[in-house]
Image: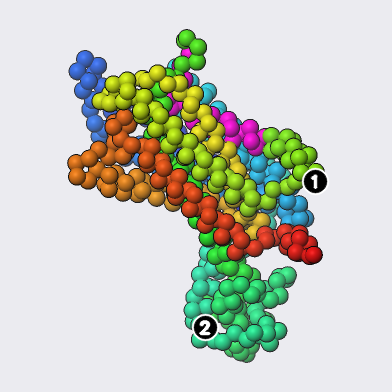
Amino acid sequence: MLLKLRRVASEPCLSSLGMFLFWLTSVIPQARPPPCVASNSICRSAEMFQLFFLCFSLGIIAIGDGAIKSSSLAFGSDQLKREVYQGNACAMESYFSWYYAMCSLSVLVALTCLVYIQVNMGWALGFGALVLLMLFSTLVIYLGTPFYLKLKPKSSLITGLLQVIVTSYRKRGLRLSSQSADILYYQKKGSAIVLPSEKLRFLNKACMVQDPRVDLSPDGEATDPWRLCTVDQVEELKALLKVVPIWLTGVVMSININQNSFPVLQATTMDRHIGSSFEIPAGSFGIFGVISALLWIVLYDPLILPIASKLTGKSVHFSTKERMGFGLFLSFLSVLEVAAVEGVRRSIAIMEGYSDDPQGVIPMSAMWLLPQNSLAGSAVALHAIGQNEFYISEFPRSMSSVASALVGFGTGVGSLLASFLMSTIDDLTKRGGQESWISSNINKGHYDYYYLVLAGFSLINILYYIVCSRAYGPCKGEEGDFMEEEKP
């Protein structure tokens, strides 16, 4: 906990420093290339120092942002009382929901107010506002330090997990008895876990005491932690390995989320007017996804659950796995919607004679893009909140930072896979001199086919998730309900 507090308190300082350096590129002429010459459209490339300064500031921002996201959520959940943390699923669900509601609200403000300031009042003022906001957040965190719950830091979690892997490999020749009571396991002092679970039993060898006189010191501690681990360490690794199959389903969904360039190109070619004078910028249609996510989160407790309870005639509470599965389904529907809309848009563009003009605006309202954005936003809200709550509730409390980092890590892996998938499809579809499905000319390409491929992957991912969810069994706190349902 103390380590999380240090990270939560120090990383805003790092992000503030990176944002300040980034702001300097807008106020110091020597920190950026000179403006392009309007008469002949000649632009000078950035010098090595200018490029390094820009990348350095962005790198610091990225490091600070990654550390904040992986620590703040877990640190906030640690502030809940232990009885709330372990026994009140609704309290945890509300915490995660409002956390993501605030994140969605901040994105909405960034895409509207800050963009307006940057476009209409200048980049220097726009980036300066971000610096002030970062400094304000840092101040607020430090002012709240006396009120935070602080626990003494424990040994490195990563080291403990590696010790279990190494020790299990070293003891791979040991035979496990079918009776756990016949085996002496090394327990951590004060731990409530007496025996390791029966799942992934081969890891139980890591905490087996072969010879107490050799393995244990006179005070009961392990003489070599790389040859004997605690039951807690073994259960921590088991908890991590158990969620990996379900975590992979989130990675596949992240591939759909990380399709950032095409939606802008698609919106550019459509009629974006509302009325006779107002035109929605092509890059702003993502706002509708953010609004959809925000509405879903805010209305979930006071409206959606009561309506579901009234329709079913009993109190309804969707489990974390149910919400994750529904999020995957909505993500599948969103890419299917993109494929359908793009198929119609491309046909109209060809009929209107815009085959060689990817910038031409066709007589089709961009409001057709709202359903796909709304579905995608709701999918992210459902799945991200469910994922975080699932990991933190299933992991030991000592692994809360790992739990909150898994979602961000999955998004990063999904982004890399999205780039790889796009490159692969581009190479395969342009063979023989044919036009690539993902051509820069979207009227000649076939982005509808590309999104149908994504829909196919999403459908397979849903089926895979159902199998993994059933194999995982009931979550913590659901075992009693599961046993009651099994009774005749």
For the N terminus, the image quarter is bottom right
Q: Amino acid at mark 2?
A: Lys
Q: What secondary structure prevails in the magenta region?
A: helix
SS of the residue under disc 1? loop
Is label 1 or label 2 in front? 1
Q: Looking at the image, is mark 1 or mark 2 earlier in the sequence?
A: 2
The residue at 46%/16% (across/down) is: 273
Would you place residue 210 above or below residue 306 in this image? below
Left or right: 56, with 135 as reference point: left
Mark yes or no: residue 143 visible.
Answer: no
- Looking at the picture, tell me which residue is in the foreground, 224 or 278: 278
The residue that disc 1 covers is 314
Q: CA distance from mark 1 to mark 2?
A: 51 Å
For the C terminus, the image quarter is bottom right
The residue at 44%/31% (across/down) is: 341
The residue that disc 2 covers is 171
Identify the disc placed on residue 138.
none
Left or right: 197, with 420 as reference point: right
- Looking at the picture, tell me which residue is in the foreground, 158 or 354: 354
Task: Tell me where the magenta segment starts and ends, as one range.
Answer: 278-298
